[in-house]
Image: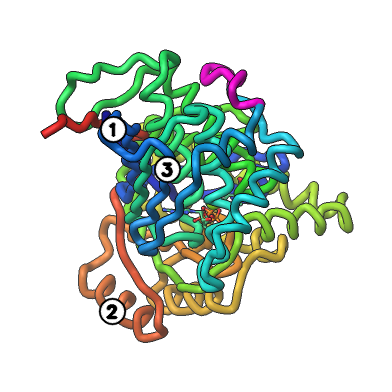
Amino acid sequence: MEVKTRAPGKIILSGEHAVVHGSTAVASSIDLYTFVSLRIATPSDDQDSLKLHLKDMALEFSWPISRIREAFPESATVLSSMPTSCSMESARAIAALVEELNIPEANFGLAPGISAFLWLYSSIQGYKPATVVVSSELPLGSGLGSSAAFCVALAAALLAFTDSVLVDVNHQGWLSFGVKDLDLVNKWAFEGEKMLHGKPSGIDNTVSTYGNIISFKSGNLTHMKSTMSLKMLITNTKVGRNTKALVAGVSERMLRHSDAMAFVFSAVDSISKELTAIIQSPTPDELSVTEKEAKIEELMEMNQGLLQSMGVSHATIETVLRTTLKYKLSSKLTGAGGGGCVLTLLPTLLSGTVVDKVIAELESCGFQCFTAGVGGKGVEISFVVPS
Ligand SMILES: Nc1ncnc2c1ncn2[C@@H]1O[C@H](COP(=O)(O)OP(=O)(O)OP(=O)(O)O)[C@@H](O)[C@H]1O
Ligand SMILES: C[C@@](O)(CCO)CC(=O)[O-]
Ligand SMILES: [Mg+2]
């Protein structure tokens, strides 16, 4: 019995961080995916362990099923249809299991992801022996929602082998889930994301689950009907950062300067609402595509200024901003900031030569540039036919 899932990464067009404090944000899925394959052991397989293979890092971890049973006694009573948060007791048990792995120092950042894996696995599949393989097209810890795509793909694969979701096991190729099943995948993924982000807004797992371009506020999503195609250049500064620490840093600034930060978050809310209206407004109306793009560029610049005032920009992000501005292009960080990825709007009428020049200049600074399809499908599943 084997299933594969894929969940997309995302870009945030406006509203990161402020969304954690109740402001509106706008996000879109991108066509770069995290893949999870889950093989529940059959009688001819190893029946004694749970294995996790992180393919991109060439790392394999394994736990005796007896250790999983010991660590999560309450998993026997958890219902896969009822997402639950990791208790303090389970968090302690997970910390012990992860510590025993002796993760190489260079990969310490994986510990929260492995913790989320252990929680989701033991809660949804209990003590079944299995092998889980994870690979990703997304750069990890770079603002493109790798943690959420990991949790969504994992939750979807784990739920596929339960009675809580209804999927056609005979379907060949990628298959979408029904809305109710997506809701369940999203709720479990949110529980995993909590272990990675500390205090997530839920926007990343939501856009990875449902796909599309969405506006999101206080846990509620609205699917947007975009009337324009948005082409974004993504520049990875390759500066590693950790979303949990950045989110915590903004919350601390909020505590220190609550009045000023409330205005910052309110300004971001207005920016996201205006962006939502522009992206959805019919074309042609009083605004041409070029005028719409100019407005979006201005909103991106304003959002970036507010992100700077939240303390989540970085010297490398400022370099990308300065470089793209030389070509009259507007940029903003995307995701948690502190390094990671920067978005630059590529207007429809921009010549290919300018795009090539700006990419060459950014790459000469040591950054990596790419474009990605915006607003595609969310999580999908594919059953592997036994050979
Ligand atoms: N494919 C994967 N394999 C293993 N762990 C992963 C994978 N993808 C994400 N993770 C976990 O998620 C962590 C990165 O999450 P983090 O939230 O800091 O960044 P991000 O999700 O890429 O960016 P953002 O939250 O700003 O969009 C990694 O350090 C790891 O623990
Ligand atoms: C920084 C943040 O707003 C987005 C990270 O992609 C965190 C969150 O919403 O959970
Ligand atoms: Mg993340």
Residue 28 is marked as 3
Of badges 2 and 1, the one in the foreground is: 1
Q: Does residue 124 show up magenta in the picture?
A: no
Question: The residue under label 1 is which amino acid type?
Answer: Val
User: Which element type, helix, strand or loop, lies under badge 2?
Assistant: helix
Query: Looking at the picture, does residue 234 appear above or below residue 42?
Result: below
Q: Which residues are magenta?
A: 74-82
Which dot, 3 or 1, sits closer to the camera?
A: 1
Whichever of callouts 3 and 1 sits on the residue coming sooner in the sequence is 1
| For residue 356, above or below residue 275 | below
Mark 3 is surrounded, within 10 Å at the Cα level, by few (under 14), some (14 to 19) or many (20 or more) other residues, namely many
For the view shown, which residue lies furthest in the left direction?
Answer: 387
Q: Residue at x 25, y 75 (%)?
A: 356
Q: Which residue is mark 2?
A: 357
Q: Secondary structure at mark 1?
A: strand
Identify the mark nearer the N-term, 3 or 2.
3
Pointer 1: what residue? Answer: 3
Quadrant in the picture for the N terminus: top left
Query: Which amino acid type is marked by label 2?
Result: Lys
Task: Report the side of 153 relative to 196 (left or right).
Answer: left
Q: Position of residue 344 (x, y in %)?
A: 41, 63
In the visual, does 233 lie left or right of 152? left
Residue 326: x and y in percent read 42, 79
Q: Earlier in the sequence, mark 2 or mark 1?
A: 1
Residue 158 in the image, given as x and y percentages of width and height: 42, 30
In the image shown, does 257 or 275 lie closer to the viewer? 257
Residue 102 or 13: which is nearer the viewer?
Answer: 102
Q: CA distance from mark 2 to mark 1?
A: 43 Å
